């Protein structure tokens, strides 16, 4: 294999290595990205918290209602048992009974409101729990798929690195240094020559250069500095 051909082959390996490394880092980013899952989890946590607050409020309204009803029973017993004869006291008891009845009505309305709120929140929590479960399943499957892809890419990288090493062992270290240096400034160090033109910069090569390329010599394009390779 001529030196320009070896270098061209090295470049192909490097291009593939770079592509696989980019694919690998993309997969690694996706593997680390659990933002959607975290968002669904915090949404559910918030809804559960709201539900807890609503239940507590409901409980305390129930207690309050029970308390008022006991008081009302007590007043009504006094009122209708016939034990109280004093007219002023009876009027007071009647007023108290009326006031308690009105408070009980208010508390009952509030309780109904709170119960319906609680039901709505429970329904929301149920939906979000289902959504989160589904999301977790999908995430898990995706993780497995990504991990498989990652393993494939890593195997390919090992293979490519092996090929690269085998190839570079056959190339003189000065030439390799030149290759790396041009690669650093030009992105790709080797340019194909087609119809007498450098495909890196599209300049037509001088005849003398063109002939040296044809003779498989190591020639750099006088315009873009790339190593020329005749296909
Ligand atoms: Zn060129």
Image (spheres, rainbow, N blue to C red):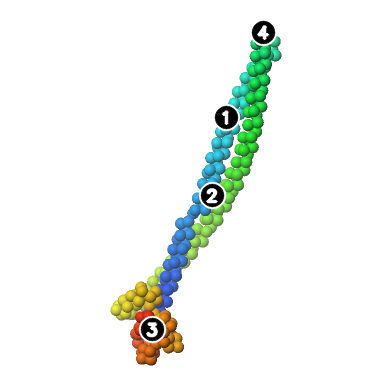
Q: CA distance from mark 2 to mark 3?
A: 56 Å
Q: Which residue is mark 2?
A: 40
Q: Secondary structure at mark 3?
A: strand
- Number of the front mark, 2 or 3: 3
Label 4 crowd bin: few (<14), some (14–19), many (20+), radius 10 Å:
few
In the image, taking residue 215 as reference, residue 153 lies left or right, namely right
Q: CA distance from mark 4 to mark 2?
A: 66 Å
For the C terminus, give its image quadrant: bottom left
- Where residue 66 appears, as percent x and y from the top left, is 62, 25
Label 2 crowd bin: few (<14), some (14–19), many (20+), radius 10 Å:
some
Q: Which residue is mark 3?
A: 228
Query: Can I make out residue 172 in this image?
Result: yes
- Where residue 169 appears, as percent x and y from the top left, is 33, 77
* Residue at mark 3: C-beta within 8 A of ligand 1: yes
- Where residue 212 appears, as percent x and y from the top left, is 36, 89
Precedes in sequence: disc 3 or disc 4: 4
């Amino acid at each position: 294999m001529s030196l320009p051909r070896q270098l061209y082959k090295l470049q192909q390996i490097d291009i593939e290595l770079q592509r696989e490394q980019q694919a690998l880092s993309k997969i690694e980013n996706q593997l680390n990205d659990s933002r959607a899952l975290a968002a669904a989890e915090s949404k559910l946590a918030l809804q559960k918290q709201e539900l807890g607050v609503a239940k507590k409020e409901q409980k305390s309204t129930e207690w309050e209602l029970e308390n008022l009803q006991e008081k009302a029973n007590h007043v009504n017993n006094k009122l209708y048992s016939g034990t109280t004869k004093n007219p002023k006291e009876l009027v007071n008891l009647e007023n108290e009974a009326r006031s308690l009845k009105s408070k009980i009505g208010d508390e009952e309305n509030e309780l109904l409101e709170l119960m319906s709120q609680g039901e709505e929140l429970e329904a929301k929590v149920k939906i979000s729990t289902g959504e989160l479960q589904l999301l977790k399943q999908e995430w898990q499957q995706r993780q497995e798929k990504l991990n498989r892809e990652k393993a494939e890419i890593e195997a390919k990288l090992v293979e490519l690195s092996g090929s690269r090493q085998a190839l570079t062992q056959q190339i003189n270290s000065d030439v390799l240094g030149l290759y790396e240096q041009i690669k650093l400034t030009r992105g790709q160090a080797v340019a194909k020559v087609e119809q007498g033109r450098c495909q890196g910069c599209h300049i037509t090569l001088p005849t003398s250069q063109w002939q040296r390329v044809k003779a498989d010599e190591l020639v750099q394009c006088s315009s873009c500095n790339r190593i020329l390779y005749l296909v």
